[in-house]
Image (cartoon, rainbow, N blue to C red):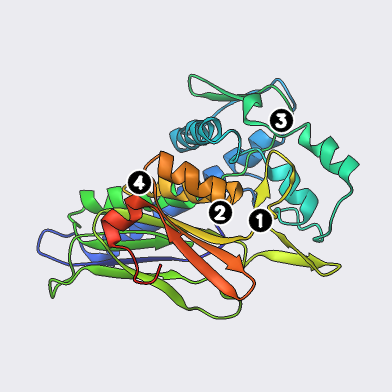
Amino acid sequence: MGSTYTVKYVHSAAVAPKEQLQRETEALLTRFDQELSTYRSDSDISRFNALPAGSCQAMPADVLHLVATGEQLSRGSDGALDLTVEPLLDLWGFGPKGQPAQVPDQARIDEVRQRVGHRYLRIEGEQLCKDAAVEVDFNSIAAGLAVDLVIEGLQKLGVHSYLVEITGELKAAGRKPDGSPWRVAIEAPREGEQVAQRIVELDGYGVSTSGDYRNYFEQDGKRYSHTLDPRSGRPIEHALASVTVLSPSTLQADGLSTVLMVLGPQRGFDFASQHEIAALFVTREQDGFTTQSTEAFDRLFGKEIGQ
């Protein structure tokens, strides 16, 4: 995933040795890389992406699980999340092929969009099939599943109090040795610095934040975010700077943060409220930022004074 991971846990007599925990965690992440990385040509998903339309390929359970989750999120959001956007990411310069970031013309966008759409993917038993020459990219949900699977492995080895973070997606449960909860900061959308927007106490919840302030380029004075709207084939253009989602499933938190980021401040907030999603929205205004949290978020972590 081109990033780092961190595991913090409380040791006890029932917990396996640290060396075993680290060895099995890294074995899982190595397996994930072999299955899901679009930055290596020999991965399972890269080999699938190279196949022509009408092809099928046997896939590991992790891949099929992510495709099924992506389809559920795509259908539920009217296409705000789509795992087949890799050709568009490459076109805009945000993909693994390393093309320069630049604004393509509309004709080229329309052409590439013919190869984008979750409807072209289907699962047949243990095989993944494509009805068009689509290319799959799991960056919007893979890290969330990795967190959940690492935790599942740690629990089997006796760990019950932990904070696991992979590429910024994280989940915590239990208590630290002094009895205090795991506390994490939700980052404010500030370029070039790390500032806490909110501090939350976690016990059994995964956290994912999507934002437009880390990965973007500027052309002719306009900012173009790496978050693409699959329905238009273009980067999002609304004022939502970041959105944080909390869920017992880090996989769901990861995917939903992308969905809400694409939908924008108003449609995203309405969607999150309707579906009882615990979410915190940070929107750009002329004189700074405003925050808005859903009722589900406030029930879990309280409403910030002055919000």
Q: Earlier in the sequence, mark 2 or mark 1?
A: 1
Residues under labels 3 and 4: Cα distance?
Answer: 32 Å
Q: Earlier in the sequence, mark 3 or mark 4?
A: 3
Q: Which residue is mark 2?
A: 265
Q: Residue 201, relative to residue 151: is it above or below?
A: below
Q: Quadrant of residue 127?
A: top right
Q: Earlier in the sequence, mark 4 or mark 1?
A: 1
Please identify the quadrant where the C terminus is shown: bottom left
Tell me the tag on residue 51: 3
Asked if labels 2 and 3 touch by Cβ distance under 8 angstroms, the answer is no
Please identify the quadrant where the N terminus is shown: bottom right
Q: Is residue 214 visible?
A: yes
Q: Which residue is mark 1?
A: 238
Residues under labels 3 and 2: Cα distance?
Answer: 38 Å
Under mark 2, the amino acid is Pro
Q: Residue at x 21, y 68 (%)?
A: 181
Q: Residue at x 55, y 34 (%)?
A: 74
Q: Nearer the viewer, mark 3 or mark 4?
A: 4
Image coords of residue 31 (percent x, y): 46, 47
Under mark 3, the amino acid is Leu
Under mark 1, the amino acid is His
Q: Residue 77, relative to residue 235: is it above or below?
A: above
Q: Earlier in the sequence, mark 3 or mark 2?
A: 3
